[in-house]
Amino acid sequence: MGFGTLFFGYFLLLNIAYYSFTDAIAALVMLYAFYKLKFINKNFKYAAISAAVFSAFGLYELFLGFSDMFFGLSYPDTLYSVSAMVRSLIICIVSAFMLMGIRDVSAEVGLSKTKIKANYLSYVTVGVYALNVVLEMSELGSWLAPTLLATLMLVSFVATPVLVIVNLTVLFSCYAKICMPNEEQRREVEKKSKLEFVNKFREHQKEKQREYAEYKIEKMKKKANKPKQNYKDKK
């Protein structure tokens, strides 16, 4: 469905040291994944739009990184600071829409634990990346005590990759539990039993699961693509 692709793209956000060289790849991979998921609900559609913006920004970061490393071009510190703020803001928006999309699809297919976890993490994500944006403000050093500033920076440095890892666990849960029927057939390789009736029972169970998955996916598609009824039509 796209959760596996999304997992790979989001995983690249763990590159903290040289993210200017991998953000474009991460954003493009996530954009492709969200394009495959956008028919499910509106939050994945918004995530796709946000990932498109992130892709453009990632190419801009790539230009800065290459020009600095290979051509020795130097830029003002303010440019890097503002770029870091914009990056954190974009990743925050992409992640929040992603988690809200996961929350909605998990609720639809009955994964209550994943739904609760995704909903909770959407708020945590906004909080962590909001802290990152604030810490990139150049005037912050004159407003806060050095000890407090150092503590906040340490919290941000630790919390950001930890948050990405936790969000990846939610994505993996979706990859493992929410899949299209044809994906499930490709991914499940089960050893046949020596007892024929056991094999028939398993096949029957799989068929019922595939039918239910098809029903739920089709229901989500219709719900997401249902045209809004205007006020005149209601009257």
Image: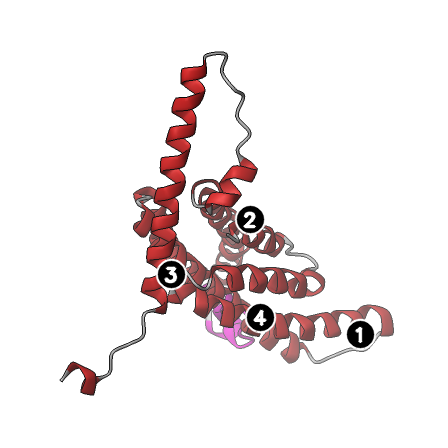
In the drawing, what numbered circle is on residue 221? 3
Mark 3 neighbour class, 10 Å CA radius: few under 14, some 14 to 19, many 20 or more: some
- Name the residue type under label 4: Phe
Looking at the rendered structure, the secondary structure element under dot 1 is: helix
Q: Residue 81, how many percent across, how many down?
A: 61, 74
Q: Give the residues drawn in magenta, as a range.
A: 131-143
Mark 2 neighbour class, 10 Å CA radius: few under 14, some 14 to 19, many 20 or more: some
Looking at the rendered structure, the secondary structure element under dot 4 is: helix
- Name the residue type under label 2: Gly
Looking at the rendered structure, the secondary structure element under dot 3 is: helix
Cα distance, mark 2 to mark 4? 19 Å
User: Looking at the image, which is closer to me, 154 or 171?
Assistant: 171
Residue ID for mark 2: 4
Residue ID for mark 1: 67
Cα distance, mark 3 to mark 2? 20 Å
- For this view, does 25 lie left or right of residue 122? right
- Name the residue type under label 1: Ser
User: Looking at the image, which is closer to me, 106 or 117?
Assistant: 106
Residue ID for mark 4: 54
Quarter placement of the C terminus = bottom left
Q: Hey, which residue is sitting farthest bottom in the picture?
A: 232
Q: Indicate which disc, 3 or 1, sits on the residue closer to the N terminus.
A: 1
